[in-house]
Image (cartoon, helix red, strand yellow):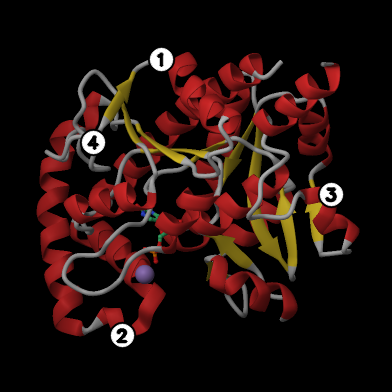
Amino acid sequence: MLRRLQSSRLIARGRAHRYIASLSQVLARRAPVDVHPEVQEALQSHSPVVALETTIVTHGMPHPTNLETALSVEKIVRDQGAIPATIGIIGGRVKIGLQREELEHLASPENDPPATKVSRRDIAATVALKRDGGTTCSATLIFAAMAGIKVFATGGLGGVHRGAMDVSADLYELSRCPVGLVSAGVKSILDIGRTMEYLETLGVPVVSYAPTYDFPAFYSRRSGFMSPWRVDDPVSAANILYTQAQFGLNNGAIFGVPIPEQFEAAGETLQQAVEIAVREAEEQGVSKWGKAATPWLLNRVGELSGGQSLESNVALIQNTARVGGQIAVAYAELSK
Ligand code: PSU
Ligand code: MN
């Protein structure tokens, strides 16, 4: 009985699932992974941990806002009673939890060669060639799942791009990493309707963490597309993740947390900038550069909006970090 209870706890804590090796297996194979001592201690004692990505640092925001934001987000996670694990790759070593100097290094605009933007496909090459890498949601989900981290907070995730056949790897990883991704929704640089349809096909629940079912659209609180589910407290969100774990459903879930209300007005202006940027990207054939599309669009929206997009971006990720911290605390409570 005790053994059965223990194994059910292991599953709920994300230790036992089929698609991704556990951290102990990976370490036993002497893969170049370093776990921050504080994160390791939290994982061992089953304390709440929140994963954070680094593409937002290397490709999503200009210096020094990228560094300031990453540090502030770590602090917000701590303020909720959880330990932040910012994930990235430095000199070919995967870091689960970055030291301050490592974060400063990734955030620096002067790295030569610059850090790569890493999704699943780029992990092995970045490690083998000893490069630096900012992990996207997709790669961050993989390392979070490996470590048994159940909650991950970010700003925006990727999705189905408009028109072109460009579907973010984030969506596939959500279908095979049992991690709750807390984000402010997807940007309207994407086709939000198709992104939602595709997530349904992949079996990934989309949950609005809001008073309405409306799925948030990053700069704006509502996209006009309805999520199938809605919660507005951390315990309900954690319960969904816990139930998925109990049933051995190895997929993740998306929690869409709308940007704070005071940024709603800016959202309308930003929407116009997004429309212009998407048109320009098509005209200039940006999609030929593959993974450059998202960073290019983010940067162009920033230019067109005179920096207003950056202010909204900082506010919304701080908000998802707060909610992510709370969900992680609630999850740890459930799996005790
Ligand atoms: N959307 C944003 N900001 C970001 C990203 C997306 O508003 O920084 C980053 C995230 O790391 C996300 C990645 O996982 O871009 C998606 O890139 P792609 O569309 O190439 O999959
Ligand atoms: Mn893409």
What amino acid type is highlighted by mark number 3?
Answer: Ser
**In the rendered structure, which disc, 4 or 3, sits on the residue that comes first in sequence?**
3
Q: Nearer the viewer, mark 1 or mark 2?
A: 1
Instruction: Look at 58% across and 73% down and name the residue there.
Output: 122
Q: Is residue 273 above or below residue 17?
A: below
Q: Position of residue 80 (x, y in %)?
A: 57, 19
Give yes or no for contact between labels 2 and 3 (Cβ–Cβ under 8 Å): no
Name the residue that disc number 4 marks.
Answer: 215
- Label disc, if present, on residue 233 of the rendered structure: 1
- Label disc, if present, on residue 188 of the rendered structure: none
Q: Nearer the viewer, mark 3 or mark 1?
A: 3
- Label disc, if present, on residue 24 of the rendered structure: 3
Q: Residues within 10 Å of mark 4 (few under 14, many from 20)?
A: many
Instruction: Look at 79% across and 47% down and name the residue there.
Output: 35
Q: Residues within 10 Å of mark 2 (few under 14, many from 20)?
A: few
Q: Position of residue 153 (x, y in %)?
A: 49, 38
Q: Nearer the viewer, mark 2 or mark 3?
A: 3
Name the residue that disc number 2 marks.
Answer: 288
